[in-house]
Amino acid sequence: MAYEHQTYEAIMRRVLARVPSNMDKREGSMIWDATGPNSAEVAILYTALDFILDATFADTAPREYLIKRAAERGLSPYPETFAVFRAEFNKTVPIGSRFSIGNMNYAVTERIADHDTPSTRAFRAVCETSGTIGNTLFGRMVPIGYIDGLTHADIVTTLPTEVAAWLTGVYTAAADSLLTVGGTVRLVIMDGAYGVPSQELIEDVQREIDPQSSHGEGLGIAPIGHVVKVDGVQSKRIDITLNLQYQSGWDWEATGSYISEAIDGYFNELARGWQDTEVIVVRVSQIETRVLSCQGILDVRDTLLNGTHENLTLDAASIPVRGAVSG
């Protein structure tokens, strides 16, 4: 702070230093009592000056004053948004159904079928109160209207609300500090099918977030002074060698399509969770478990991933893609 040393004690020392030494200026003296209250007021004034100095500059201004500074250039902040969640129910509920937790209300807006489990049905639920307060409550919801057969309704987790997730064709995005180099934020996206985005999609998102021709100038969604480089997730090819024992009457030709489908399903699950994990780990045990569930397979062992028996840890911006599978 510019005036952090202008304390009451420092001001009193300077004031008393101006009083002739042949006069009584000890604590409790008439001079001390006369100068003390004024020194306290001056210290308060310095505190106010320090705040005013910070509020003058956009880099240090509190939000209220930053909004006023931006208004001088015709800029205004985006309005508060509504928190979005994944909610799980024991049955399919009508779109538009409303629920509450405490004093927060939520409305069901969309089915998320790919997050269903055998015992639950997943939906997108939006808090009816805007702002960060909507992110504070999780757990059991109470239906506002009667829903026949409903036994449980829970807010499970927030859903992606990054700006990039609003753009057509983009499933999710990650802007990680580990991906930040030289003052530029690297925003990594995947497409709506949880895969590697096309170059055209990357360029569209770059143009919306922070156009290359005017990096950091605030002409996209990114604020002024924020340079964003948009990239797509990369695919990591994984070749898989299986040592299979077949059930009677089965062979690779009969089981291969089932095995490939099971592996693709596992890799798709990993890609869906890419945003919520630091790195993706492709596990031998998970592949063997999926393969064992396929028709015609009695046992599987000694599985190799890209020629090794070990789990594969991918780069932070990579998702797995099935390569050659043999068994």
Image (cartoon, rainbow, N blue to C red):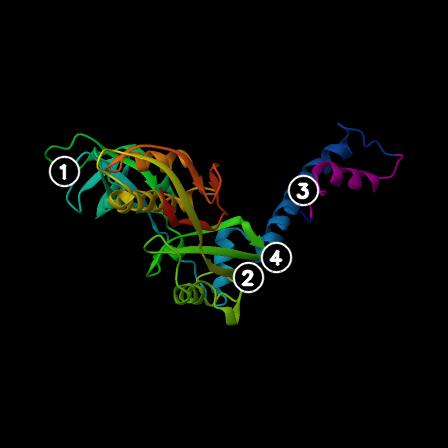
Residue 34 visible in the picture: yes
Residue topped by disc 2 = 225
Left or right of residue 302, residue 112 in this image:
left
Which residue in the protein does label 3 denote? 43
Does the magenta run of residues contain 84?
Answer: no
> Disc 1 residue type?
Gly
Up the image or down, 127 lies above or below 223; here it is: above
| Residue ID at (32%, 54%) | 193
> Circle 1: is it few (<14), some (14-19), or many (20+) Cα within 10 Å?
few
Q: Where does the magenta region start and end?
A: 3-22
The residue carrying mark 4 is 182
Left of 258 or right of it: where is 320? Answer: right
Say which element carries label 3.
helix
Q: Nearer the viewer, mark 4 or mark 2?
A: 4
Nearer-N-terminus badge (2/3): 3
CA separation in Å, label 4 and label 1: 53 Å
* Label 1 secondary element: loop
Other-residue count near label 2 (Cα within 10 Å), few / some / many at <14 / 14–19 / ≥20: few
